[in-house]
Image: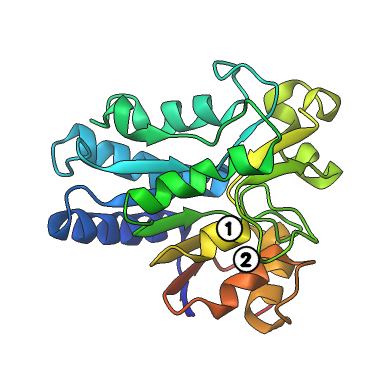
Amino acid sequence: MKIITNDISVSADQIADQVKELLDDKPNAVLGLSFGKDLIPVYQKLKELGQAGELSFGDVRVFVCCEYRELDKNHAGSIHSFMNANLFEGAGFSDANIFYPCLCSEDEEKLKEYDEQISAAGGIDLMILGIGVNGSIGFNEPATPFESYTHVQLLTDKTKNLVAEDFGGAENVPEKGVTMGIKTIVSARNIDLIAAGEEKADAVHKIVYGKTIPFVPASMLQIHMNLNLYVDSAAASDI
């Protein structure tokens, strides 16, 4: 694990440089992308570079980490809307190369087809993640098994409260989401995780110093050989 402490805007520039280096070497690279407010500066920087012609995303394959169940993808709170607004729209991505997990079934074998798609694309070259205050990654909530692949996940109250503003109240947040599993995420060749704000300090502490346990899903990233942990001073206050 490499820990990089900087203002979030600086970290966004550093991650963008990493993406540029990857695409210079492999124009059809495979990206895994999650959602969350800490990722907005990263995505907006990548979008700016795409709009300026400094990055070409036309051949890039993207596998989005998660989406809410039983929610219209055009809903303002959907992951589709978040990704479109903050990155995809106008940046040069091909719609045919953007993939989301299937929302049509809770059948485990059907859901695992997403993992098969990722494998068929050659695996994820770079996974870009945020983290929840409870150590969640994607929609992998505490106690999610390490061996999990793409699955339906019941969302905790903490997760609902974090996104409540997007839905006009926590009571309107969908009960479930579909997410890449921890095993899916950890299988990426490189992982960038970004965390900002004092409310993330405890989760960051547990990633760095805690035990590798399912109760803190992000702690499972400790085993990854190519993990960059980008934190601002507030998120790094306990390390």
- Is residue 74 placed above or below 213 in the rendered structure? above
Q: Quadrant of residue 134?
A: bottom right
Query: At which x and y percent is residue 86?
Result: 43, 33
Q: Residue at x 48, y 65 (%)?
A: 187
Q: CA distance from mark 2 to mark 1?
A: 5 Å
Q: Quadrant of residue 91?
A: top left
Q: Is residue 237 visible?
A: no
Mark 1 crowd level (few <14, some 14–19, many ≥20, 10 Å Cα): many
Mark 2 crowd level (few <14, some 14–19, many ≥20, 10 Å Cα): many
Q: Residue at x 50, y 42 (%)?
A: 114
Cβ–Cβ under 8 Å for marks 2 and 1: yes
Q: Residue at x 46, y 72 (%)?
A: 227
Give, as a three-letter code, the residue at label 2.
Ala
Task: Out of 133 and 124, give the one closest to the viewer.
Answer: 124
Q: Which residue is mark 1?
A: 196
Query: At which x and y percent is residue 15?
Result: 35, 59
Task: Out of 27 and 38, give the one closest to the viewer.
Answer: 27
Which label was assigned to residue 235? 2
Label 1: element kind: loop
